[in-house]
Each structure stands twice: as structure tokens, then as C-alpha cells.
Amino acid sequence: MDCSPEYVMPSTAADPEQVPTTTPPVFFVHSLESDSDEVLLDGAEGRHAATVRRVGIGETLRISDGHGVAIDGRVVEVVEDGLRIAVLRRVPVPVPEPEFVVIQALPKGDRGELAVALMTEVGVDLIVPWQASRCVTRWHEARGVRSLQRWRSAAREASKQSRRLRMTQVAELTTTRDVCAILVGAELPIVLHERAEHGFSTLELPRRGRIALVVGPEGGLTDAELQALRAAGGQPVRLGEAILRTSTAGAASVSALAAAVGRWG
């Protein structure tokens, strides 16, 4: 979620009455040259900007490579299936601290894409799909490839909608062993569990490094999975008294964490 102060474009030679006072729309490109004075927004993003959003000459927008390089620009020409953009300034895109990683057990149906969109909007930096034992959904072969593409597309669109200049990343499908390795490397590894003794208020939250959160499937974690996650350092925590769906628990948890550590400050 973009909680940055109200955006004001720096002064330029353009008519000051044309300067926007709201955050301009965000579009993603594969790469941005560090010293270029102009950017061509073409391909699918260019067509969307020019023909769907109908962005015209003189309007401002932000373009990002999704990984830390971004610019503010003004449209100087509408070309076939795209826009030619004059670079007004480079936009600093610091690495978020702490980093939020959610290991998400595969939900049923299209709830996976809902979970990805919600988590992207509230600020999750990396989403890791997890084939937990009790997952009803199974990502096999071609179906797994299509499902991963849909998750990544959902993250991309939600990043644009929420004006994120660093796009939420979606990792490859993981096993429980992979999840344990992620927890070992985290400053704060959390495992959501409805029978945990402690709640979020008992956690000592880091301001740097990685907070990793495990969200189990609809059927819950098996005893073997919980034992393995705890052995990797995972701290079982319950999110209040209510039992949330696996598709919403990650977003609700990260919202609480983001406010507590100052990422929404």
C-alpha cells in the first residue's frame, strides 16, 4: 500500500497549473537506462496507457523497472501503441525495511490470486507459494505453470494499482524443506497457528532484515509440518480469536506488522 505523502511534481518549465497534486499512475518496463532523457513506453504497457487509460500529451506518470529504478515523466508524444516520455526526475526507491516475506499455502480455486493481490496491496515484498500437505489445490506440470503465471500477473497488476514502484515478487513453488530454509534465514520467522499460546503483541519486531510469515492451508498444518517449522525457528502465533481464511490471513497479518514496525508511518 502506498502511504507516501501527497505527491507534488517538482517545478519545471511547464505551466504550473498543469502540475498534478496526486500520485501519478505507475507503469512497468523491463529496464530503464540510468542516463536517458526520454523513455519509450511501448508493448502491452504502452498500449494500455495510450488506448485504455488514454494518457495524453502533457500528462505525468511514473515508470519503474519494478526492482528499484524509477522515473517521473511527462508525455511528449503519443505514438503507435505507446507513449514517448520526457524524464523529469529520477525517483529513489529504497529497499523496504524490514522486508516482508509470506509463505502462502496454495488456496482453493481462484483464492490464490485474491491472496496475492491483497498481500501486494498491503506491502508484502516476496510471496512464496507452498505445496503444504493438506492443500486441496495441486500445482502439477502445465497447471502449475499457468497458476504461477496467474499469481505473478496478479502481483504485477496489484503493484500498479497500489502505485508500488518495487513490484511484489512471486517465487517458484516450494516444499516444506524450502520453507524451513527461508525461516532459518529470517530475523523474525512467524508461523500462523490457531492453537498458538501467544499473539502478535508478544513478538519482538525487528526494524531491519526479513520478517517471514507462514500461512497454512484451509485444512491446517500437519503435526509434522508444525514440528519442522518450529525446528527451523518458526514462532507459532495466533492472529486474534477469529480464524481467517488462508486467502486473507497473510494480508491481515502483514497489515498489523507494517503498522507496528513503521512501514506505514
Image (cartoon, rainbow, N blue to C red):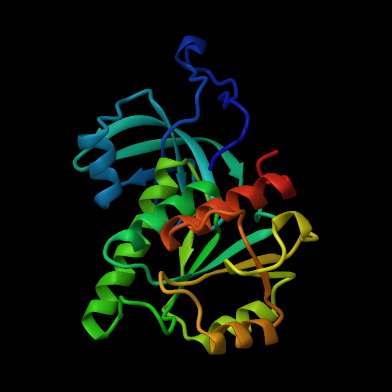
Q: Please name the residue shown 50% across and 58% down the image.
A: 243
Q: Looking at the rendering, which quadrant does residue 48 occupy?
A: top left
Determine whether 260 is above or below 222 in the image. Answer: above
Q: Please name the residue shown 52% across and 20% down the image.
A: 21
Which x, y percent locates residue 189? 68, 71
Q: Please name the residue shown 36% across and 50% down the image.
A: 157
Closest to the observer, 165 or 132: 132
Which x, y percent locates residue 191? 61, 71
Name the image quarter holding the C terminus.
top right
Q: Please name the residue shown 70% across and 59% down the image.
A: 199
Kindly tell me whether residue 170 is visible in this rendering: yes
Which x, y percent locates residue 78? 26, 33
Determine whether 112 is above or below 141 in the image. Answer: above
Q: Would residue 246 be found to the left or right of residue 88 on screen?
A: left
Determine whether 93 is above or below 213 in the image. Answer: above
Kindly tell me whether residue 65 is visible in this rendering: no
Closest to the observer, 25 or 11: 25
Counting the numbered discs, the total is 0
Determine whether 53 is above or below 128 in the image. Answer: above
Q: Would residue 49 be found to the left or right of residue 99 on screen?
A: left
Q: Would residue 24 be found to the left or right of residue 80 on screen?
A: right
